[in-house]
Amino acid sequence: MVLEQILNGIMLGMVYALIAVGYSLVFGILRLLNMAHGSIYAFGAHMALFAVSVNWGLPAAFIFAIITTGILEMLMDSVILAPLRAKNAPNITCLISVIGVSYIIQNMLMIVFDSTKKSFPKLFDFGNVTILGVTLTSAQISMFLIALVFLAVLTVIVNYTKIGLAMRASRENAKAANLMGIDVRKVVTFTFFLSGMCAAVAGVLVSGYYQMVYSTMGTEAGLKGFSAAVLGGIGVLYGSVVGGVIVGVAEALAVAFLGGSFRSATAYIVLFLVLLIRPSGLFGKDNIDKV
């Protein structure tokens, strides 16, 4: 029973990790909490639903959702955040702006796709697999593997490519990076695109797992992803992954032993307990400017 819930939690936790990484990418460079990330996650799921509805097929729908969601994040930065940064607007102004964007996206989804829950096709169905005596569905395994591969690719991009080096340099000191010939604006734009891709992949995987899409689906998922990012140490990518898995496992165990009514509260209870002991998160630095 316990092992089954732990495995279920790990499968779901990898999706929370994807959402958390999206928060950490943006925060790592701009020290900005992208509170529109949950709505962008819902946008990605709806883009996949649209592509499926016009008979593009699931692979094409997946790619379409990733690209359009990444572009949406880039537009949010270039149209709203970049002008604010150019005017040296305080972070609170940028934070309020992205919260406003979140509501705009959510309401646009309600207008275009309506506010009802809509059916989404199952992504994978190749039977069940038994691991250590625990039966896992093909949807769970596929969700875990796709999230794992995407996180691995993201890690390679950030740590072993030129653009990744530019991202890390911009994170440490944007002014010095500019002086060294790095176009920080392009780096920030690319970072927002990656963040949008993370949200889209998570949105499509969760939609395929639960076979359901609705306009406010990003509210709770976004908050859980944010909790996972803070839990692991926001701005630290591997911390976000660990935080996501912890949140997923804690949620699964809470549902099993305390009931479904404790599902939503679990992430925040774990977060509070960890932050009481280590305010910067599990892998975060005491100095928030050094991540």
Image (spheres, rainbow, N blue to C red):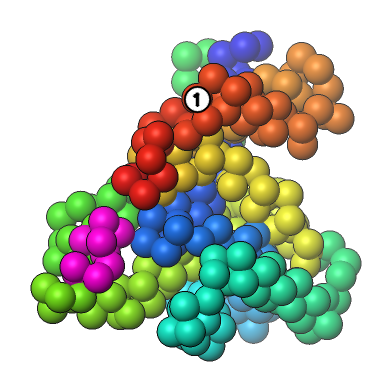
- Give residue 198's position: percent from left, percent from top: 47, 59
Query: Looking at the image, which residue sits at the far left?
Result: 180
Task: Say how many tags the image has.
Answer: 1
Q: Quadrant of residue 188?
A: bottom left
Disc 1 crowd rating (10 Å Cα; few below 14, some 14-19, many 20+) is some
- Is residue 101 located in the magenta-colored stretch of the structure? no
Residue drawn where x is 32% and y is 55% of the image: 154
Position of the C terminus by quadrant = top left
Image: magenta residue range: 169-177
Residue drawn where x is 30% and y is 59% of the image: 171
Q: Which residue is mark 1?
A: 278
Residue 82 vs 11, above or below: the answer is below
- Give residue 15's position: percent from left, percent from top: 53, 46
Q: Quadrant of residue 57?
A: bottom right
- Give residue 243's position: percent from left, percent from top: 50, 34
Residue drawn where x is 37% and y is 36% of the image: 285
Q: Amino acid at mark 1?
A: Arg
Residue drawn where x is 76% and y is 24% of the image: 255
Residue 192 vs 250, above or below: the answer is below
Q: Nearer the viewer, residue 245 or 81?
A: 81
Report the side of 212 relative to 114 (left or right): left
Q: What secondary structure predominates along the stretch shown in magenta? A: helix
